[in-house]
Amino acid sequence: AQSVSQHNHHVILSEAASLELGCNYSYGGTVNLFWYVQYPGQHLQLLLKYFSGDPLVKGIKGFEAEFIKSKFSFNLRKPSVQWSDTAEYFCAVNAYNFNKFYFGSGTKLNVKP
Amino acid sequence: GAGVSQSPSNKVTEKGKDVELRCDPISGHTALYWYRQSLGQGLEFLIYFQGNSAPDKSGLPSDRFSAERTGGSVSTLTIQRTQQEDSAVYLCASSPRDRGHSPLHFGNGTRLTVT
């Protein structure tokens, strides 16, 4: 079975700091990769996704993620966080043409103003 | 347009009672998923529907859990004889196609508390 690991469970940053959240998955075949965000009191929403092409993917609100196949990783980055980025972030993966999405345990990001 | 709608948003029930959770997906979305999110845990897959059929129900934790989908639209997740360990947020998501790179659209979830 596939699995997804998010190494940081809780991250606290000051505004303007740079962010990198780790995500590793276990599956040797072709995968589709996603980052979802859940703002306080809101539903999960898509931040960005990768399924083919340029391994550096840009999403909403200045977020980006890089797919490194050799490392089975899909880390999320943002050069300068804002207080409004306070949320929980989930990495997800599914095998190409399969329907089950596997999610990591999430990383809570707290940005201090 | 309307997103994925789940009801109720909160449900408190006594141990041993049955509960039904409802999901109304985005119109036209053929794929529908149920996940469970427990405190401090990731999203646990429960079941997946393509149309009205459930090709993957491998995540249902016990035979107390069942789900159905009618008319290719609304889905109901039923938990019989609820236990305290069933307390969690139950999330529904839909997707327009059965291909993996179509992202999931989530509802706000139903927070179930079993006392």
Image (spheres, rainbow, N blue to C red):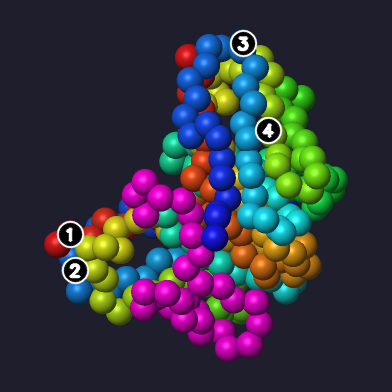
- Tell which subunit mark 2 falls on: A
Which amino acid, mark 1?
Lys
Q: Nearer the viewer, residue A11 or B36?
A: B36
Picture disc at residue B100: none
Q: How many marks?
A: 4
Query: Is disc 3 placed on a helix, strand or loop?
Result: loop
Give the spatial CA distance, label 4 vs label 2: 41 Å
State the image quarter where residue A29 is shown: bottom right
For the residues beneath circles 4 and 2, the answer to whether they share a chain is no
> Mark 1, chain letter?
A
Q: Over which residues does the magenta segment extend?
A: A39-66
Cβ atoms at labels 2 and 1 below 8 Å apart:
yes
Residue marked by disc 3: B16
Across and down, in percent, residue B53 comes to: 85, 45
State the separation of the CA atoms marked 3 and 4. 16 Å
Q: Residues within 10 Å of mark 3 (few under 14, many from 20)?
A: some
Residue type pointed to by label 2: Glu
From the top left corner, tell me how far across and down residue B105 is, in percent: 58, 57
Q: Residue at x 62, y 65 (%)?
A: B103
Proximity of marks 1 and 3: CB atoms separated by less than 8 Å: no
Outermost residue, front side: B1
Q: Closer to us: mark 4 or mark 1?
A: 4
